[in-house]
Each structure stands twice: as C-alpha cells, then as structure tokens.
Image: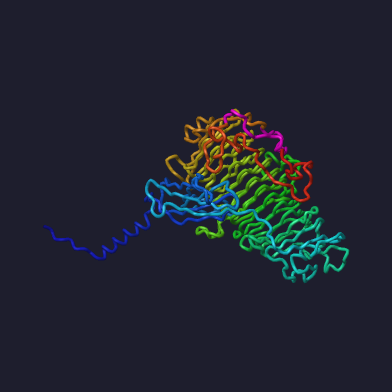
Amino acid sequence: MGSPIKANPAACRWSLALGLAIALFPARGLAQNQTTAGEFFVDPPTLVSLGFEWRIAGDDNRNARVEVTYRQRGEREWHRALPLLRLQQESVTGGVLRDGGGHYFRYVAPNMFAGSILNLQPGTEYECHFVLSDPDGVKGAAERTVRVTTRNEPQPAEGGHVYHVYPFGYGGPKQEPAFTGLMAAYYLGAEESDHSNAMPPRVRPGDIILVHAGVYQDHRFVYGGFDRTIAAYGTPFDGTYYLTQSGTPEKPIVVKAAGDGEAIFDGDGCQNLFNLMAANYNYFEGITVRNTNVAFLLGIKNIAGASGFTLKHSRIEDVGRAVEDDWSGSKDFYLADNVFIGRHDPNRLQSWWTPAVWAKFPGYPALITSEYAIKIYGQGHVVAYNYVANWHDGIDIATYGDPDGTPNERRDRVPVSIDFYNNDIYNVADNCIEADGGAHNIRVFRNRCFNSAGGALSAQPTFGGPLYFYQNLVYNTTTGGPLKLIDTPAGVLVYQNTFIGQGRLMGPASNVHFLNNLILGDGWADPVLNLRTFTNYSSSDYNGFRPNPGTQDAFEWNSPNFGVAKDFEGQLVARHFRSLQEYSEATKQEQHSVLVDYDIFLKARMPDKSDPQRLYNPEDFDFRLKPGSRAVDAGVILPTINDDFTGRAPDLGAYEGDRPPTQYGPRSAPQGAPDSSAPRSLTGPLSRP
C-alpha cells in the first residue's frame, strides 16, 4: 500500500474559498438558469393603471415567466392581466456625443420583470397576484400578492376659504372677500415694487381662488403701481406669478374660473407666466393662458420641481411651451380636458428636417415658435383627453438622459408609471407623442395623431420598459412614419394600433414586440416594417400589413445571427423580403399575420404624397373595420386590452367590432372656449359626431 496522503490545511482552506467564490460569483459564461426571486416593487398608481417591478437573479436562458391576475377588493373572480415583461441587461447606448466621446445614454436594464395592469377603475382597491415560474426552478418566494388602490381624479376640497379675484378696472358687484388680481389673493397683498415678494402667503391647503371673467395682463415695467389708471398685479419686470404655497393631495390649493365668463391670463410676452417649482398640489381649472413663452414652469433638471400639479378644462394658446417639467422628483400630475393651441401655421404641415421633401416650401425649416404643449418627467403622471394642435411636439416625456443614480437607480427618481391617453393631436412638425426618457411602465394608449412630419410615436430611447403603445390611431405621418424607435430603446410593446404609414426609424432597438396592429403603407417609403433589433427574442405576429404595391423590399428584419439571443456590439444581419410569406418563412415571425388594404375600413383613403403640407381632418375618416374584412377576428387575446372582444377573436387595429367610438380630446369645452363652428385647427374638438 502506498503512503497515506496528508491533508494540507492551507490548500484545503484555499479550495474551500475558491468553491465558495465560484458559487457566489459564477464565472462569465457559466449559465445560471435557475431563477432567484428578489425585491418586489409597486410603482405609484395612476387613475387607470397599476405598475409593478420584480427583480430577480439568474434565468440566463430567459425561460422564466410571471403570470398576473387581479380582482377588485370584495370580488370573488380573478381576472387575467398581461404577463410581466422580461428584462435582462438590454443595453441602451444611444445619443452620440458630437465630440466623438461616445454616448450620453449608457444604461443597462436590470435583471427583472416589469409590467402593468391596464384599464382599471379610478379610486378602486385591487388585489394583484403574481406567480413566478421557471422550468429550471425558482429559489425564494415564487408568489406575491399586493393590494393597491388607483388614484382618484383631483378635485377641490370642501371647507376651505374661498377668495374672489377680479380684473383691474372691474366696476360691477363683487363677492367678498374680493381682490384685484391673483397675487393679492394668493398672498397677503400685491405690490409692483421692491416689496413685490415681501408678502406672506394667504392661502392654505384646501383654499379656493375663484377668478372672475376678464383679462389679467400686468404692466410689468411700471414701478409702484401708483398710477391708478394702469393695471398693476404685482409681477414687476419679469411678469411671473411665483406661487410658492403647497397644498396636499386631499386639499390642493385651487385657482379656478368663477364661471361668469372667460378668465384670461395674458403674459404680455413674458418668459414664464406661472412658476410653481416650489409649490406642490396646486390646481388650475377653467382658465385661459396666452402670450408667454412658458405658461407653467414646474421643474428644471437637477434644480427643483413640483408634485401634484393639476390643470383641467383650460385653454392654453399663443405660447412657446404650455407645461414644462424635467425634474425627476415630480409626481402625480393630472392634465386633462384641456386645449393647447400652438403658434405653428394652422393651415399647413411644416417640417424642420428631410430637406429633400420640405425645403421647397416657404418657411422651411419650421421655426420652433411653439416647441411642445406638455413635457414632463417623474412618476405617476396622467395626461388625458387633451386637444393639441400646431406645435413642434405634442406631448412628451423629457429626454432627460440616464435615470438618476444609474447604474443603481434611485427608486423615487426613476421615470415610471406615466399615462398618456385619449389625447387628440393634430398638425405637429415633429412627434405627436415622445415617450423618450421613460423607464418602466410607460403607457401611451387610445390617442389619435393626425398630420405629423417627424414620427408620430417616439421612443428615443426607452430605458428598459415596458413602454406600451396600444390602441393608438395614426394617420398622415409623411416623412417620419408612425414609429420612431432610435437611440437603442429597450422594452417596447406595440399592441393593437392602426398605423397609416410604414416603418422608417425603427431601431436598432431591443426586446420589441408587435401584436394585433394594422400597418398600411402610404407610399412614402419602403418597407412597411423594417425593424432593426439587437435581440432575437423581439417578436411580431397577428398583424395586418399593406406593403406599397410593386415594392421589392416589403419587409426587413435585421437582427444578430439567429443562433444568438442578443448582440449589442456586433453587426446586424440585414434581411430583405419581397412578400409576407417569404419574410414569415425566413424569420418565423408573422405566423398568423395577414395582408390587408384600405378597403378594410368603413371610410379611409391613402394620404396624397404629392401634397405633403396638406392637413387631413379626422372627422372625414372612419377607421372602424368593415364587417367581414380580413382584419376582423384576426387577432390574439391581450388581457386587459381587448378581452371584451365581440367576435370569434379580437379584431386587428385600434377599434373592436361594434364598440362605441373612442373619445379623443376634451370631454367638455373649456370655460369660454370658441364655439364648435370655428375651424378645427384653431380650436379644440368641442363637438363629436
């Protein structure tokens, strides 16, 4: 027998430590397919949506799933929702620095699931159940149940003080307590002098300021206000109303039209009329704002900002920006039922790019006289039922850059849980809606976009997602196309939309999925779908396509080699196809998709490419489907989006069967708005067919 081998204590300790290190920190390339459940987060709720995030470890082979069910409190039956979207280190490296220094977006999505329960009821408590499964096993708690309540629409509170504001020179009867101008009511006085900011605030949470009919325009260059023949409202020199007192979610500070006629705040050309960066839960309703560059300034990146701002049933016109906020700490805005009219030409579409098409027209490049109606950032915001016309951009999330704290996101500063819905957007030189800069659970749904030059719906970029684009109607997108997916967005879900116009700026992007859409080419460019994706787990099916007749390049699907799940650094393989069948067979996408044409609609036609400046009136079209057309019953069930379908299966596109028409724009006219006989481009959609 040989001599026994003696143990080396030092070697044993080294071997044990190495084994422990391998277990805790597996070598690069060593798959960890089992899923370990991590932290579970509930995003700030909106009125009709709830968002969730579930961090995990492992699942390198991406075969884990999270199924979702929900029910109202007290209800017995559980309902299915869409499963959470799997995120797994998708890379967002867009925004090339002009000095050659790389990219100014350098974001990698966390290893996680995220997603939303959609189309809920406001002010309702829901029980939400999540089940994590993985064929390779789950370590840790595989089920989570949470109770979350959706928000109610903000309303004035009862029991607060009521103050009445009248314009300078008003000579009629007054309700008491009465004040001349807003500042005199909001504060304990107003003065057009060095003492303009010396007055303490009068208002407290729950108070209501009623603004009576008239024009409120300050003579901001007049010192002292001693000439009693000149209006002096207390905003010397810069003309800004600095409103700094905070309300609460239950008791906002309210500035509201009194109901006796149009209450107009005219900025006299000032830079910013209302500055609320230091004030939370201020509420405006029924007023008109005009003649200023920025109507409502709510936040500036890395400086300061507000939460809880509400703007309802108001009219904003002749301004450069209506609502401006790019402060990451802003939360819970509610902007609904307003009319926003910009300074761009109301009679023709203009553009600032693509000179080959637009440079021959007077006014090129289109000046940004009205940059955007709404731009916001933060969490829990709702922008709904607004009419937006004649702008560069319509409604935007701020293109902020990497979320604060990246790569270790600050939970209270990541842009999540933002809803844009039922807005009516008309005549924009760039994008109708920009979801640029959003991270998780961004929902853009049931909006109508007519006449745009730069891409109707934009994700430039999205930081991980999911970003939901669903049930939107887009028409006449000229040189931009319906979708703009550039600067490497990740996590974009494109469901149940009607897009007139084909893909142009679609990628490269990651983790992108198309279902139940109608995409009809309008002759501006080929192909009808040209996704460029870093991830071979992007997908597309159950869609209806109308390629431009005679094209040799009807579809493009450019991705890494099919044997590679994802590749963010290598060259994408370019694939061009003449037909839907050829494309489907080669890529295994669109296994249930169909070819369609404009005759599937009750009343629709292709835009006239020879006249790109022409503005089309939505009321001249009816994009509901003809009974029996190829798009009817051709979709797949998407729980909480189309599970109220009326036939054998859901229809394709934004409209289902004989459901009532979708309400776009304000549900009622703003106080003092022009009557519905005025030209559409100059007013909101004050009546509906």
Q: Which of 570 and 519 lies nearest the eye of the viewer?
A: 519
Q: Which of 411 and 92 lies nearest the eye of the viewer?
A: 411
- Report which quarter residue 631 is drawn in: top right
Whether residue 488 can be seen here: no
- Report which quarter residue 525 is drawn in: top right
Q: Which residue shows up at 79% across the image and 42% down it?
A: 678
Quadrant (top left/top right/bottom left/bottom right) for the N terminus: bottom left
Residue 65 spot, x, y in % from top left: 44, 46
55 relative to 428 in the view: left or right: left
**Predominant secondary structure, magenta span:** loop
Q: Which of 670 and 5 lies nearest the eye of the viewer?
A: 670
The answer to if 447 sits in the magenta stretch is no
Residue 487 spot, x, y in % from top left: 56, 48
Residue 523 spot, x, y in % from top left: 64, 33
Highlighted magenta segment, given as a residue range? 606-630
427 relative to 33 in the view: left or right: right
